Image: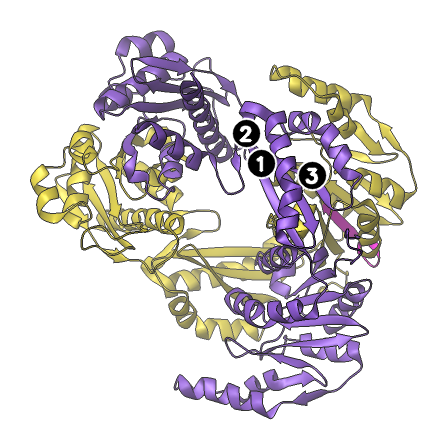
Chain colours: A yellow, B purple
Amino acid sequence: MQLPDGAAALRAQIVAVGTELVTGDTVDTNSAWLAGRLTDLGIDVRGHATVGDHEHELLTVLRAATTGSDVVVVTGGLGPTPDDLTRFAVARLAGVALERRPALVDDIRAYFADRGREMAETNLVQADLPAGAQVIDPVGTAPGFVLRVAGVLLVCLPGVPAEMRQMTERGVVPLLRRHGGLSATVRRTVRTAGIAESTVAERCAELFARLSRTNNTQLAFYSSRGETRVRVTARARDEPAAHALTDPIVAEVVQLLGAAVVGLDDEGVESVIARQLQQRGWTLAVAESITGGGVGARLVSVPGASEWFAGGVIAYATASKPTLAGVPERVLAEHGPVSEETAAALATGVRDRLDADAALAVVGVAGPTTQGRRRVGTVCPAVALPADVVRTRTVRLSPRSRQDLQQFSASVALDYLRRCLAAVQGG
Amino acid sequence: MQLPDGAAALRAQIVAVGTELVTGDTVDTNSAWLAGRLTDLGIDVRGHATVGDHEHELLTVLRAATTGSDVVVVTGGLGPTPDDLTRFAVARLAGVALERRPALVDDIRAYFADRGREMAETNLVQADLPAGAQVIDPVGTAPGFVLRVAGVLLVCLPGVPAEMRQMTERGVVPLLRRHGGLSATVRRTVRTAGIAESTVAERCAELFARLSRTNNTQLAFYSSRGETRVRVTARARDEPAAHALTDPIVAEVVQLLGAAVVGLDDEGVESVIARQLQQRGWTLAVAESITGGGVGARLVSVPGASEWFAGGVIAYATASKPTLAGVPERVLAEHGPVSEETAAALATGVRDRLDADAALAVVGVAGPTTQGRRRVGTVCPAVALPADVVRTRTVRLSPRSRQDLQQFSASVALDYLRRCLAAVQGG
């Protein structure tokens, strides 16, 4: 692909190593993440390959991947067990020996010593790198490395997603930037909730068509777990130029989608709620039934949650609703545990017990069986605000697995809270 | 791989086509699903490849995939748009022309007519198949096909996951069964927690080496989110024969790993706890700080949780610990919120408030900053049992992201509860 200034983009291949991936026991998410990150840097990812823990086949795949590429990134097969073969295959590919690095041996010993854990000697194989390789510092115990093989930059990273991602950001991205020859691709995301993917696509149809006629900007739609994301992509000579292309498009998408917009890029509904509460100086409590704690778990994932999250109750069994949140027995008897009335009583009850400013409650039927007259997939969120303002709704989710319904219910509840807080703040 | 009866397993490669996959905009779940399905049929999946919507590169990947394979399954690139190129690449690979199938034209027209939708003429390209190809009936509008190319069975399916799966079950699996030469592969999993992957590997080292010398049984280790799984795979002429091979190996692994074994196959720690509680007729309450509800969310994912899960409290803010679970102010002042003493007080407090038989509490430091003298990654679970038996521990998790620490803490707490319940039941 030619860039406006005539520089050719670097070509990359991604290789995932692991029999568990080849047999389908584990879905490979590393390759997609890496591909996105390399694409962001203006690198032209040409393909991915997945291969099992067999040295000969790994060598064959590495040979094919390096052919015609500038960069090859390999994940997996760097651990301490006998089926971790990447270091051996790379050494053979490069025609060099493995050598044990004393500094890495010390690191690995220190890692275990720090945790007061016994170290199996087999861990030290992780200190063996192909001669000439440059270390990428480990996040866990497995270091990565970079080696130039016949002009190709071969990057090897462990397969544990969290380690791989951190090591990419700290060790690989800076190296690729120094390597030069990069253009810039900027990808922005407009995140929505509570709106169908087809409705999103319909509202953006004219914009989509307009961008399709350009060769450096693009719109795409992705949907998962009740959230539809609109992806805006632009490619230019450098990052400021690419941002200058995406900024007005993002603004246009936000306008087209209105109240359904949750946030941009990595800003999930939890972060938006954190911001909404902090702007008001409010604290929040939760009362969960169907989600069993899933709403709270998502809220505390935001750093600094202790500044605004008071806590809450998991009022799962019907009997726990009066005990934990003071839901009147009369409300339960009249309306049943899955009702807007019970959700409202939970919300006001937990708000008052924890002396919080606002509260979110959610009840529902996760199945496998119906609850009274309420069908599987019925979800009622309730939001209690100061001055005894309480808002409730009923949402009917389409049938899916129990666990999916529980996770969707948490998303529905959080989006409802976001919308209620936005309405207050707008008023 | 030779089978005992001398029949070689079919070797397969999987190819996913689509630029959205190569750039990481979409995670490919088709390949893992197909790989699992083929593995179950005793087919030896050797690798996967992902390639963009470029005819020349697709052809290169198809050539490599067919080399040394008996079966190649391709997903994607069969739709009506100009970037759907699979049919062209396959026709070139086979050296045959595309021919329009009148029956498929009728089907496509009928599909749109049935839904009262106008049909764009471009849709008819989906009726063009390589000469000699056998149709796999469509679920949507895109038919699949099978073509024998130089002795290799080349199966092409659309990329929409739901269509691909149905067409595989209805059109591809029966064809592979008729093709014969299938064997049975049985895969069993021994799940562990609270033990390092390297320790698991070391304890199983002799068994691993022994199985490596067979050609029909195998051991592998996988680790994620604090749980290490040992996978036992055996291949034989039929399923009972494969089970006869795996059963004694699974028993041996369970014996080697002892108390670290959580369960087998799909049985996670939540299901084991459910069973342990139900055997005793006990109910459980939880009190969560660091996990914010994540422990409860995992427990309620078990169908029928309402029979033994009473509910609990999310005692996140320090002030909520006395309010929600009656933790004495004195304990908080003396030991701080992250301590075994506070965890114990939370566990007994919530057990008594909810009149449950047992309770699990967990406190800890998720970061980004330390809490008093307690470092990020410090986690204290506590378990309260009947007759005022309380057990506590302190675990130091290695630094990782806040969200990972919260999820690990939930795993640590649940595994601690499992071990405490097992000890009671053994005593």
Above or below residue B415? Residue B149 is below
Query: For mark 2, does the 10 Å Cα neighbourhood hold few (<14), some (14 to 19), or many (20 or more) residues?
Result: many
User: From this viewpoint, which residue is outermost toward the bottom?
Assistant: B102
Q: Amino acid at mark 2?
A: Val
Q: Amino acid at mark 3?
A: Leu
Query: For mark 3, does the 10 Å Cα neighbourhood hold few (<14), some (14 to 19), or many (20 or more) residues?
Result: many
Q: Are marks 2 and 1 on the same chain?
A: yes
State the extent of the magenta-drawn residues as a range: A65-74
Residue B261's tag is 2
Image x and y of residue A44, in percent: 71, 59
The chain that hosts pointer 2 is B
Residue beneath the point at 32% across and 32% down: A309
Could you tell me how far apart the alpha carbons at marks 2 and 1 are, in whole angstroms?
A: 7 Å
Image x and y of residue A171, in percent: 70, 37
Q: Quadrant of residue B23?
A: bottom right
The chain that hosts pointer 1 is B
| Residue A410 seen anywhere in this rendered image of the structure | yes
Image x and y of residue B96, in percent: 77, 84
Query: For mark 1, does the 10 Å Cα neighbourhood hold few (<14), some (14 to 19), or many (20 or more) residues?
Result: many
**Where does label 3 land, which residue?**
B219
Say left or right for B188 vs B402: right
Residue closer to the observer: A187 or A139: A139
Could you tell me how far apart the alpha carbons at marks 3 and 2 are, in whole angstroms?
A: 16 Å
**Where does label 1 land, which residue?**
B190
Do the residues under discs 2 and 1 have CB atoms within 8 angstroms?
yes
Could you tell me how far apart the alpha carbons at marks 3 and 1 are, in whole angstroms?
A: 11 Å
The chain that hosts pointer 3 is B
Image x and y of residue A197, in percent: 41, 65
Give the mark, 3 or 1, whose residue is nearer the N terminus: 1
Give the mark, 3 or 2, whose residue is nearer the N terminus: 3
User: From this viewpoint, which residue is outermost toward the right?
Assistant: A95
Residue closer to the observer: B337 or B170: B170
